[in-house]
Amino acid sequence: MFEARILQGSILKKVLESIKDLVTDANFECTANGFALQAMDSSHVSLVALMLRSTGFDHYRCDRDVTMGMNLLNMSKMLKCADNDDTITMKADDAGDVVTFMFENPKADKISDFQMKLMDIDTEHLGIPDTEYEATVKMSSNEFQRICRDLSSIGDTVTIAVTKDSVKFTTSGDIGEANITCRRTSDGDMKEEKVKTEEDGEKVHNTKSSEGQNVDIDLQEPVTLTFALRYLNSFCKATSLCENVRLQLSKELPVVVQYLIEDMGYVRFYLAPKIEEEDADES
Amino acid sequence: MFEARILQGSILKKVLESIKDLVTDANFECTANGFALQAMDSSHVSLVALMLRSTGFDHYRCDRDVTMGMNLLNMSKMLKCADNDDTITMKADDAGDVVTFMFENPKADKISDFQMKLMDIDTEHLGIPDTEYEATVKMSSNEFQRICRDLSSIGDTVTIAVTKDSVKFTTSGDIGEANITCRRTSDGDMKEEKVKTEEDGEKVHNTKSSEGQNVDIDLQEPVTLTFALRYLNSFCKATSLCENVRLQLSKELPVVVQYLIEDMGYVRFYLAPKIEEEDADES
Amino acid sequence: MFEARILQGSILKKVLESIKDLVTDANFECTANGFALQAMDSSHVSLVALMLRSTGFDHYRCDRDVTMGMNLLNMSKMLKCADNDDTITMKADDAGDVVTFMFENPKADKISDFQMKLMDIDTEHLGIPDTEYEATVKMSSNEFQRICRDLSSIGDTVTIAVTKDSVKFTTSGDIGEANITCRRTSDGDMKEEKVKTEEDGEKVHNTKSSEGQNVDIDLQEPVTLTFALRYLNSFCKATSLCENVRLQLSKELPVVVQYLIEDMGYVRFYLAPKIEEEDADES
């Protein structure tokens, strides 16, 4: 039997909102470690990886590994029926074909349970190799969303150029060209923070919230890559999950766009760069 | 001549908004008692009854009974031109074919008058028998609206089951099932409050507003009935009129969904239950 | 070379929003005096005249007169990428075919530059004769917008009748008629204010803001004119530019609808009245 309860149900609602437009059907993998998902978007261009660690739930029980195939749009419809301050409990029998979402309000006088039919979904789990990235940028997730949206009104792709001191977003289209440069604003204790947040599960980035719109850059080598704005804009639906977004870039590798989910885990989006001649020459 | 003035024009605006999507054309009956309307919705499935008592107006004069046929959409267009803090005056001559809506702002430096043509509408007034209902539920109108809307994302009908201690809303559809249970939270001085509000016209439910989302149940016999969510959702457009909604249910009878209009009167919606086999057996 | 910087970029954004739906392509005239535009709307019924005086910019340099043909929709797309508290700088070379918009945020860690291609636009500059108007009305721009929008739900045209003590807006349509009368509420120090604002560039109307929704009327002769509401509604997109709007009316002349732009200049809209028989008789 699988059972997982989260007091702050709004987190689960936000997670679904952030991926439901990208992925239609997906298998959730429930294990002793946590509640995870990995799926290609419906056009097979980008990849989503979600991890909600068991330690982040207020109650978590998973007697044996379970794979639950869900339609994310339907799941989102049900989760929308939970109030933001409701407790959400997910339940499934090992051999069942149904998952139950239970919502309880804080005053405990309204209790909802929603049963959703599970689906059989054929997928292959892609191994994502652990990579040292040439450039890591951490910046305000709102700012990143704003930039992607703004550039979309000019062009279809964005070229992201990371140097030691700045990250520059460039596009061009029929009506003209645009360059947006964000300067590095801190000395980059970013790495340390990342470790703490992911390993110890401390709410480290809460204590950092007063720092606001800092841009941190961790650079092995300057890197310039071009991506389809359409997908980046879709990733930005995760903006409300976390104050900061982390971009990891390396030549010829997919960019990793990561949003941490409080001290529970993360949503990561992967998107391959557009191959352009100058990139090809450098390789 | 008919003339009725209401200082808090927003009330009249909200009344119109709550019924204009359900009813297209309707006869308003203006008598010494008040300003009333009774009409079937355009698909002849539900019934609306509105009563604004003459004592609730700040000025009211009705020399003889007048029937005014109005297109509610047009009436709503005109009332939308009143600011929420405007005074609204309705005027009509006994034999005229026009009604005038006059709006005055609090500073009395902006005065609007709108003339609307009246219509001849054939209707028969349905007598609504005074009934003792098996179950009466009073709950937050916001909560009721939320439940109807949420369940609409899963199914088309809702089964409302009232017991001594709770009211349960159930639906099912292609993507699954949903149950929402609201527990009774008070000992039900509801009956007394109802009497006071309707007879004495005291602003009783204002003094109760601090109690919030209480669910009161007054039960002769448990009752379970099924309704089309589409109509309930339409009724919920009256939510802003009153903090609480009252549902009255009896086997095989239409549910009465009532919103009180401050100390002026009420909007009541009637909707017949879906006949299902188990209901038929019990009768 | 032309270069103009404005610290409060939101002003330039609002100016564009107020005219971009009316005018598609237009020539901006950059001179030592300022940044100006004059254009007919696309149906050649109304005229827009914009003036941003050089003295109102925080930095302004214009070595020789330049005419820059721009697509206002594209220009608006670019300006929308500026935050409201960004500084905006416009730059163009004398012989170039490109204009650059540069945005800097207050913390100076985000810098954007957008290049837009210029266009060759054939226009003739219309001389607008300096006229003494029979009636000048100054009123809350919000109130004027509200009235134009409200009347649009009843009819297509509005008749504006100005007397010594009031301005009355009338329309009629299939569903009925409407009259909105705004009473003069002050003794009209309007003229003095106008002079100060336009000549001295003092922020006079800021100090008047507490007076709220006053209606000032300066009248040589009562005047009654009829206009298409469609265009007035379009002019009202400038509402956010200024707390007050000024209407200038004379028989058989276009109305002038003016919004001051802080101490920088103005947007003026001109619209010819509908010729009706009674107007013709009076002339």
Image (cartoon, coloured by chain):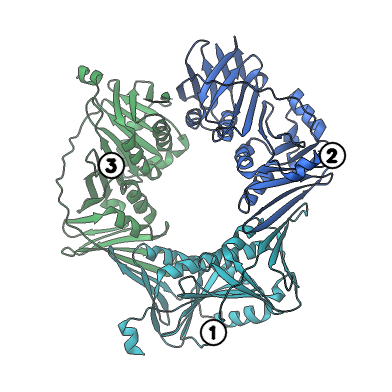
Chain colours: A green, B cyan, C blue
Is the Cβ of the residue at disc 2 closer than 8 Å to that at disc 1? no
Q: Position of residue B64 (x, y in %)?
A: 74, 79
Split into 4 quadrants, where in the image is the N terminus of chain A?
bottom left
Front-lying residue, B280 or A27: B280
Q: Is residue B196 left or right of residue A185?
A: right
According to the image, label 3 marks what residue? Answer: A199
Question: Residue visible at 70% across and 79% down?
Answer: B65
Give residue A156's quadrant in the image. Answer: top left
**Residue A60 in the image, given as x and y percentages of width and height:** 26, 58
Q: Are marks 3 and 2 in contact (CB under 8 Å)?
A: no
Q: Nearer the viewer, residue B259 or C39?
A: C39
Q: Is residue B246 left or right of residue A182?
A: right
Q: Is residue A169 left or right of residue C158?
A: left
Residue B247 visible? The answer is: yes
Q: Which residue is mark 1?
A: B128
The secondary structure type at the circle numbered 1 is loop
Chain at tag 1: B
Parent chain of label 3: A
Residue C44, compared with residue B239, is above or below; it is: above
CA gap, disc 2 to disc 1? 61 Å
Query: Which mark is nearer the camera, 3 or 1?
Result: 1
Circle nearer the viewer, 3 or 2: 2
Q: Secondary structure at mark 3?
A: helix
Residue behind mark 2: C221
Q: Are marks 3 and 1 in contact (CB under 8 Å)?
A: no
Task: Give the chain of mark 2.
Answer: C
Quadrant that contains the C terminus of chain A: top left
- Name the amino acid type tagged 2: Glu
Cα distance in 3D space between marks 3 and 2: 81 Å
Report the amino acid beneath label 1. Answer: Ile
Residue B4 in view, yes or no = no
